[in-house]
Structures are given as C-alpha cells and as structure tokens.
Amino acid sequence: MSELKDKLILVVDDENRMITFMRMNLELEGVRVISASNGREALDQAREEMPDVVLLDIMMPGMDGFETLRRLRTFSQVPVIILTAKDDEEDRIKGLELGADDYMGKPFSHRELVSRIRAVLRRHYAPPPTPQTTVKVDDRLTIDFARREVLVNGERVNLRPTEYRLLYHLVQNAGYVMTHEMLLTRVWGPEYRDETHYLRLYVTYLRQKIEEDPANPQYILTERGVGYRFVDFHKNQPAEV
C-alpha cells in the first residue's frame, strides 16, 4: 500500500495539461487530488480543503506563485513544493526564502514527483528532536532544546523548522566537521544528499539570526569544500564538581 494513499494534494497550475499529468500520476499512488488554475482559487482551496501538500507553479497570470505563497504562509504551514523552470536558480531561492519546502524543475518525471512529495511529508510530520537539555554556548547565545528556543542576548530568535533541525545537528556535533552530505541527509533526507545549495542557503539564514557578524561567523564555521562545524563550546564550559 502506498504511503501516500488518501493524502490530499492541491495542484496549482494554469496549464491544464500539467494538472492532468500530475493528477494521473498521483492518483496511481492513491492520492486524492484537487486543483486550482490561479492564485486566488488556490488560496480558497487551501483554506477550505486543508491539503497535505501544495504543488505550486510560479509562472501564472495575475497573482503569480510567489505572491500566492506569501499569502498562503500568513495562515498555513502546509508543505509547498514550487514548480519552476529547470535552470532558474533565482526563482528557486526566492521560493525557499518565502517559505517553500522544496522545488522541482520542469519537466520532471513521475518518479521524481512522488519522491519529493514523500520527502516533504516525512520532514513535515517527523517529530522534532527535543533532548532535555539547555546549551549555553557563551554569554551571548543560549539554546534550550527542550523548549525549542534560541536566545541571543536574552531575546528569543524565531527559527523555521528546517533551520532548527540544522542547528540541532550542528550543535549536537559541536567541534566536529559535519560534511555536506551528512547534513543534507539528516536535515532534508537521503534524496537531497547532492543539493548543496539548500545547505548554503539555510546556513546563511542561521548566521543572519544568531551571529553577531554573519560575514565573520563565530559559531557556524565553514570547512571549505567539506562541510560545516559548530564551534567547540564545551572546552569553555566550567568543569563539573
């Protein structure tokens, strides 16, 4: 039995042939599919039907996919996969910055479509890591994993779920180099082990939120060509007595 069986997926595209292609392939997996041909219709469907995943085309007349995504994120955290031209890196980055969970470049295969949907569902519904511990990195940065809180100079910093998972794995391995492949596999899933641009983008987000000077990071350090290492704060901790 397909793990996608009975999931509700909203397909948003102004091309009927694309909706038909995705509907046919997804229904083979037991998925229930609803569709919208423009941004306003998509927002209405998302409010009324509460889909499990949204497949959102970027290039639509009127309200494009970016504006649709921006408005969607004001009331829903449903996983969103944006559909974009294969070589348009700016669209991919902008979509991720607006809160998309993944992207797929057109054209794509049935196998890739199903694999990406499974991956975003797995990430979205997996319980977050919550070790019962508080980490005081230094006088400036404290991380309370039990409450999923990050405090910078005593002020709470809001992290997206993916940012939190990335920080968790870096901090839990403080002082050790985490390779690109290790981080991508643990945070995004094994399907993403080669998608290093995801990692670069989210490391940038984290640095902007926790570093005093993101251009000269003191916490998340780059090991060029290999991966990233969180500063070894343990050696600065007072010994237990």
Image (tube, grey):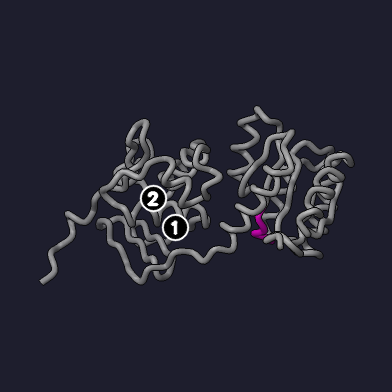
- Is residue 77 covered in magenta? yes
Q: Nearer the viewer, residue 173 or 219?
A: 173
The residue type indicated by label 2 comes to Ile
Kindly indicate the quadrant of the structure image that contains residue 86.
Answer: top right
The total of numbered circles placed on residues is: 2
x%, y% of residue 149?
Answer: 42, 64
Residue 210, disc: 2
Decide if residue 193 is on the left or right side of residue 22: left
| Numbered disc 1: secondary structure | strand
Q: Looking at the picture, how far across and down is residue 238, in whole percent?
A: 14, 63
Residue at coordinates 29% horizontally, 55% vertically from top-left? 140
Point out the residue furthest to the front here: 1
Quarter the C terminus occupies = bottom left
Q: Pick whichever, 152 or 137, lies toward us.
A: 137
Q: Do tag 1 and tag 2 residues touch (Cβ < 8 Å)?
A: yes
Mark 1 = which residue? Answer: 157
> How far is the residue under mark 1 from the one under mark 2?
8 Å
**Drawn side of residue 115 relative to residue 141, left or right:** right
**Nearer-the-camera pick, 153 or 16:** 16
In the rendered structure, which disc, 1 or 2, sits on the residue that comes first in sequence? Answer: 1
The secondary structure type at the circle numbered 2 is: helix
Magenta span contains residue 175:
no
Residue type at tag 1: Val
Q: Residue 17 location, x and y as percent?
A: 88, 39
Q: Nearer the viewer, residue 63 or 181?
A: 181
Is residue 39 found left or right of 122 in the rendered image? right
Structural crowding at the residue carrying mark 1, measured as other residues with C-alpha within 10 Å and reported as few (<14), some (14–19) or many (≥20) = few
